[in-house]
Amino acid sequence: MRTFQTLADKYDTPLYLYDFDYMRDQYNKLKEAFRAKKSLICYAVKANSNLSVIKHFGDLGAGCDCVSIGEINRALRAGVKNYKIIFSGVGKRDEEIFEALQKDILLINLESEAELQRVELQAQKLQKQARISIRVNPNIDPKTHPYISTGLHENKFGVDLDTAKRMYIKAKNSEFLDPVGIHFHIGSQLTQLEPIKEASEVVTDLVRSLKVIDINIKFFDIGGGLGIQYDDETLIEPYDYAQAIFSTLHGLDVTIMCEPGRYLTANGGYFLTKVLYEKINGDKRFVIVDGAMNDLIRPSLYNAYHKIELVNQKEEQDESLCDVVGPVCESGDFFAKNIKLPHTQHDDLIVIKSAGAYCSTMSSNYNTRGRVAEVAFDSNGDRLIRRRETFEDMIALEKDYLKD
Ligand code: LLP
């Protein structure tokens, strides 16, 4: 049987591990919940953009929600069809818009009036009609961490209802724009259904008022944001989520789209790291491991909680409080503070859980530490899906410019 230990021995640490069976099951649960209506699940590539992860969802029928031309090209490279790809984001370069239009993706999601003009211009250059949707900011508090709340007017995302309506009319009157979608996304790691339902009510009202003026919305995109259990959070059940959305449609005939990232991948991911050594400063105990904030930044950046366990811990071992920290030269380089762990030895293996979303994608080369390897496993076995970055990889873009 594969264990964390055998995989760490085989691939070395630090290491990301992804459970592809878990990810498939999460996708199927969500798809099943929306079965009563036409739906398209567009995986939010930003959560985990490894090509094999994207392909895994693509093979199950998912589309992709992308926020840069880089993500669009990843989705295409992973075999996702262009007509299932949408392009969101609050700032898009002209070149990105042009390329997305050339590649004939399903929708470009507009987040401002200025952006509508830029997209119209690029579509005109290509002499084609750009299919667009508009991101509405419904001004609803999603009740999540302020850094990942996006549906309030104080956030930079989307446009208010009046602006949206004005934009739809402009788009309808443009030879180069085809307004076919509407979108909202009020935040991430949502654990309460009510704000989503409220937002959906507000947005369906707008869809109905657009219908009256002969603007027919075909794609109703409810964004991403479904929360997961890092600790003991209450969860929104996919079935309840779907039913809540259905209840706001009041007979509208639309394809429901959603853009989950975290829900599909987070709890299928594990970060394995080895203990280098322990030290005591005064009465403070530190467990120093070979992974660091550059590999997994969520605790440092958001004070986020990730469950941490000592692999191979024996029941009778005494535990005491410690901080689990990495080798990076920052006091903020920690994975956990004041958690209980038994005394550890050099090379003991530690697993950091819920590491499948916003972990590898937010990693960096800070302190010239190479990005770590990624491995997928399922009931059939395990395989490398990203090799460990070497020193040569890290200097590849600089070395040719080195002066004598
Ligand atoms: N759609 C849009 C427009 C988004 O902005 C996001 C996430 C998603 C979908 C996917 O949301 P999800 O289903 O994964 O919650 N780095 C942060 C999360 C940032 C989320 C940004 N937008 C973290 O580590 O918690």
Image (tube, rainbow, N blue to C red):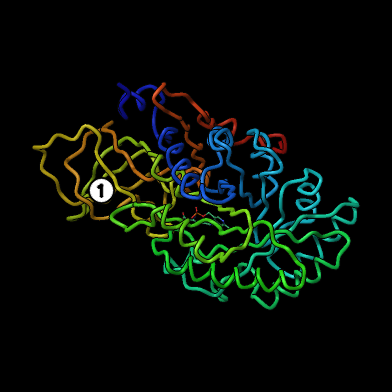
Report the residue at 43% width, 42% height from top.
26
Within 10 Å of disc 1 (Cα), the crowding (few <14, some 14-19, many 20+) is many
Which residue is disc 1 drawn over?
A: 286
Looking at this view, is 285 or 17 the one in front? Answer: 17
Which image quadrant: the C terminus?
A: top right
Q: Position of residue 225 (x, y in %)?
A: 48, 57
Does the image show residue 330?
no
Looking at this view, is 12 or 205 the one in front? Answer: 205
Does the image show residue 34?
yes
Of helix, strand and loop, which one carries label 1?
A: strand
Q: Position of residue 367 (x, y in %)?
A: 49, 44
Furthest residue to the left?
316
Report the residue at 47% width, 44% height from top.
32
Q: Judge whether 384 appears above or below 36 on screen.
A: above
Query: Which of the 4 image quadrants contains residue 117?
Result: bottom right
Query: Which of the 4 image quadrants contains residue 112?
Result: bottom right
The amino acid pointed to by label 1 is Phe
Q: Judge whether 365 appears above or below 283 on screen.
A: above
Q: Position of residue 123 (x, y in %)?
A: 85, 55
Report the residue at 69% width, 40% height from top.
73
